[in-house]
């Protein structure tokens, strides 16, 4: 923190001193501030004015050029097959949109501010919008759609301490998601609190530690709920773009058991977890282990990147029966530049109380826990910044149910996407 305070003091001093410095620089060498220098003196204020305007213009440009504006837009057609456990629900076909716009601005060299606004569905605007999805279904008689604060973070990366990053606010998930696994954390989640990331590099090895503390429910009459986490990741780089990565993480949810479920809809949904009344029946202390590897396969004059991963999670809290989850998958290619592609596959099983259902993937088996299944997707990039994608989920939901009708809850989902970004 001392570095941060020092940096702040330097920044304030620089700001306070800058008008003096500018003024000193404007002065012609050897000139004296003497009244009555005739015509020259009369022109002075105009000249100074011009110069001030120029400096102002340069400053404005700098400020503008240093900021980065980015955004993306996705059109999606989605099909959800009739879930076999509910004969009342028919097959769904829904067109959906997602729009996001972000700003990345440096405060000073070591401090950045990031802001992002995004669409998200809300059932009750007072409780906010879906924390794990930024899709909006095109419905409700062409109503105007809500846009929400998706990200507002400060990122402090002191140049004096290489490899250190401190994050504050509503932030991008600081934890590593091995192979982009969304077994524990959905990709759309932007947790709220503080995090520290520190990477130590030693030759071909690097060791990264990530600490996070996030608030989940602020309650006036009761203790607040939150989640504290730690991850340690060891990376090993080999020649020819081969890498190996292994890690362990632990996420301790506090004041969660026997407390109301985390549900943005305000209707008491537990997203697969066991409830007693409207409260969580269990505590969640999630221990994860993961492994990821990447290499390249030569294809003509090019090389196609391949990535494989496995990720497991166990709820270590006592008296939890359905406490285990795992996912394994592979990705061939990378959809980044024109005429590139990525083919992905994964299989997962996530038991009822392995993780908090509100924060796991919002798509597999209808979102939340208590399911298993395959996901296969293909992405292609026909033009710069344009991606076409298709994903298919072949799942079984409600796997903990003993009722014969519910036991095999076939769940099918298809997503066809057109996405653009700038
Ligand atoms: Ca999601
Ligand atoms: Ca706990």
Image (cartoon, grey):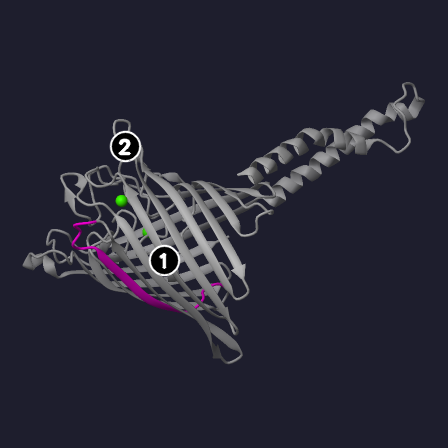
Residue 197 appears at what percent x and percent y?
47, 49
Circle 1 SS class: strand
Is any part of residue 26 visible from this angle? Answer: yes
* Magenta stretch: includes residue 328: yes
**Which residues make up the magenta segment?**
318-336
Q: Is residue 130 left or right of residue 91?
A: right
Seen from the viewer's position, the closer of residues 317 and 29 is: 317
| Farthest residue, direction left | 404
Is any part of residue 80 visible from this angle? Answer: no
Task: Ligand 2: give its quadrant.
Answer: top left
Q: Is residue 45 left or right of residue 170?
A: right
Circle 2 SS class: loop
Badge 1: residue crowd in 10 Å (few <14, some 14–19, many ≥20): some
Q: Is residue 211 above or below residue 25?
A: below
| Farthest residue, direction bottom | 300
Give the quadrant of residue 366: bottom left
Q: Is residue 320 left or right of residue 229?
A: left
Residue 395 appears at what percent x and percent y?
21, 62
* Magenta stretch: includes residue 220: no
Mark seen at residue 320 = none
Give the quadrant of residue 195: top left
């Amino acid at each position: 923190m001392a570095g941060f305070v020092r940096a702040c003091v330097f920044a304030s001093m620089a700001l306070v001193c800058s008008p003096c410095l500018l003024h000193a620089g404007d002065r012609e060498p050897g000139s004296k501030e003497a009244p009555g220098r005739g015509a020259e003196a009369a022109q002075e204020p105009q000249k100074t004015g011009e110069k001030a305007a120029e400096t102002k213009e340069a400053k404005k440009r700098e400020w503008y050029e240093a900021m980065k504006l980015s955004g993306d837009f996705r059109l999606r057609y989605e099909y959800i097959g009739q879930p076999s456990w509910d004969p009342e629900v028919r097959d769904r076909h829904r067109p959906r949109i997602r729009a996001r716009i972000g700003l990345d601005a440096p405060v000073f060299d070591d401090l950045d501010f990031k802001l992002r606004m995004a669409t998200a569905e809300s059932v009750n605007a007072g409780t906010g919008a879906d924390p794990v999805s930024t899709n909006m279904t095109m419905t409700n008689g062409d109503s105007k759609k809500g846009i929400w604060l998706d990200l507002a973070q400060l990122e402090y990366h002191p140049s004096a301490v290489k490899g250190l990053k401190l994050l504050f606010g509503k932030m991008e998930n600081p934890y590593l998601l091995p192979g982009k696994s969304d077994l524990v954390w959905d990709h759309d989640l932007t947790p709220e609190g503080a995090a520290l990331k520190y990477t130590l590099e030693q030759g071909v090895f690097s060791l990264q530690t990530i600490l996070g503390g996030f608030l989940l429910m602020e309650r006036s009459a009761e203790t607040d709920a939150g989640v504290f986490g730690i991850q340690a990741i060891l990376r090993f780089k080999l020649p020819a773009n081969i890498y190996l990565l292994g890690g362990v993480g632990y996420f301790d949810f506090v004041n969660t058991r026997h407390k109301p479920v985390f549900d943005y809809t305000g209707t008491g949904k537990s997203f697969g977890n066991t409830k007693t009344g409207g409260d969580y029946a269990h505590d969640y202390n999630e221990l994860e282990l993961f492994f990821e590897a990447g290499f390249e396969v030569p294809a003509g004059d090019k090389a196609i990147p391949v990535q494989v991963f496995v990720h497991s999670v166990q709820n270590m809290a006592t008296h939890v029966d359905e406490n285990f989850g795992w996912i394994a998958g592979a990705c061939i290619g990378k959809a980044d530049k024109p005429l590139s592609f990525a083919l992905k596959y994964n299989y997962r099983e996530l038991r009822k109380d392995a993780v908090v259902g509100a924060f796991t993937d919002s798509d597999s088996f209808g979102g939340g826990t208590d399911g298993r299944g395959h996901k296969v997707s293909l992405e292609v990039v026909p033009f710069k910044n344009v991606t076409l994608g298709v994903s298919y989920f072949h799942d079984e939901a409600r796997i903990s149910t003993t009722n014969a009708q519910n036991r095999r809850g076939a769940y099918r989902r298809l997503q066809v996407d057109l996405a653009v970004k700038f």
